[in-house]
Every structure is written in C-alpha cells, then in structure tokens.
Image (spheres, rainbow, N blue to C red):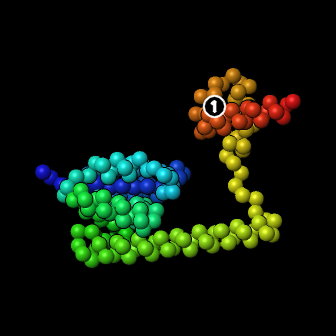
Amino acid sequence: MTSAIVGYARTSTLDQTAGLEAQLRHLDAAGCHRIFKEQLSSVDTTRPELERALDYVREGDMFVVTKLDRLARSISDLVKIKDRLLTKGVTLKVLDPSLDTSTPTGKLMLSMLGSIAEFERDIMLERQREGIAKAKAEGKYKGRAPTARRKAADVRKLRAEGKTVEAIMKELGLSRSSVFRALREEKVAGL
C-alpha cells in the first residue's frame, strides 16, 4: 500500500482568497496528493473539511498544514488532532516552521509551538478586550453593524420587485430569518 501526503488549508473568512491560494500552492509544492480546504473561523464548532481530512487519512500517510494556526484553535485542540492522527498511524508535518512529528524533536517542537501560539492568541484577545472597554468608556465604540440590518433596504427593494425569499437569500447572502426580520421590521415601521 502506498502512503499518501494529504494537505489541509483554512482561512478564517471567504474574502481571504489570496491566503487560501498561497496555502494551496505550498501544499502542492510539498507533494500533497489530496488537499482539503475550507474558509471559516477556527472558533466555529465544526470544521467539516478538517473532519473529512482526518477521516480520510490512513496508516502511513502524512498530514500536512502550512502553519499550526491553520489547524488548531488551542493547545488542547492541537493535542486532540495530533493524538487522533497518531492513533491512525499518521504523521503530522507543519511547513512553517518546518517540523515533522515522525521524529522525537518534531513532537517536542509541536507541543512547544502550540503552547506559544495559544499564549499569543490569549494575549491578543486580552488586548482587544481592553481596547474595546477603553473605547466604550470614552464613548467611541459603536461595534460592528449587523450585516442583515445593513442590507434591510436591499431586502425590501428585492421583495418589492417580486423576488422570492429564497432568491433574496441567495442574492444577498443572508439567512432566511434575516430576510424575514428585515421584512417584519418594515411592517412594524409602517404601522
């Protein structure tokens, strides 16, 4: 049986196409026979393509990612993924920085880098929370405008043109509940 080199690429948002393309180039250059890719935040509870990739790999395969933060959201998440791969007899290779869990040094470095990455993320989130709290105290923080509310006028316009809810959802990239909420707000405002 021939072992496979399987890659996984992820970006946090759909508009990060350049980042995804760069990861795909690196994984291709690393000799990946099959690449699983997705564009969603690592904090999402499910990452379906990662699950498919982890189910796909077999004993003797190598699982490749460009960077640790593309794979795991925390050290505990990284350990779970690493253990799942180890149980299946699959090695993990990270391209940047170069480390391979088929060696004892690679295993040690993976744990250390995972801990450092989690620490850096925690520090960044703490600074972000402090900045938001300061901006709120100074009356400067408005937060992010909800996407559906920004598109409410477009929803009403498309509906007035006779478009179906499904067509509006598809055209504007909104959920069914967001479309109905925009239409409902129009009725309330018109009373």
Residue 187 visible at all: yes
* Circle 1 residue: 168
Q: Is residue 164 above or below residue 94?
A: above
Label 1 environment density (alpha carbons within 10 Å; few <14, some 14–19, many ≥20) = many
Q: Is residue 172 above or below residue 91?
A: above
Looking at the rendered structure, the kind of residue marked 1 is: Ile
Residue 28 visible at all: no
Q: Residue extending furthest left?
A: 1
- Front residue of 48 and 18: 48
Q: Is residue 30 above or below residue 112?
A: above
Percent position of residue 16, x then y: 51, 54
Left or right of 117? Residue 15 is right
Identify the element where label 1 is drawn: helix
Q: Quadrant of the C terminus?
A: top right
Percent position of residue 10, x then y: 43, 55
Percent position of residue 67, x then y: 40, 65
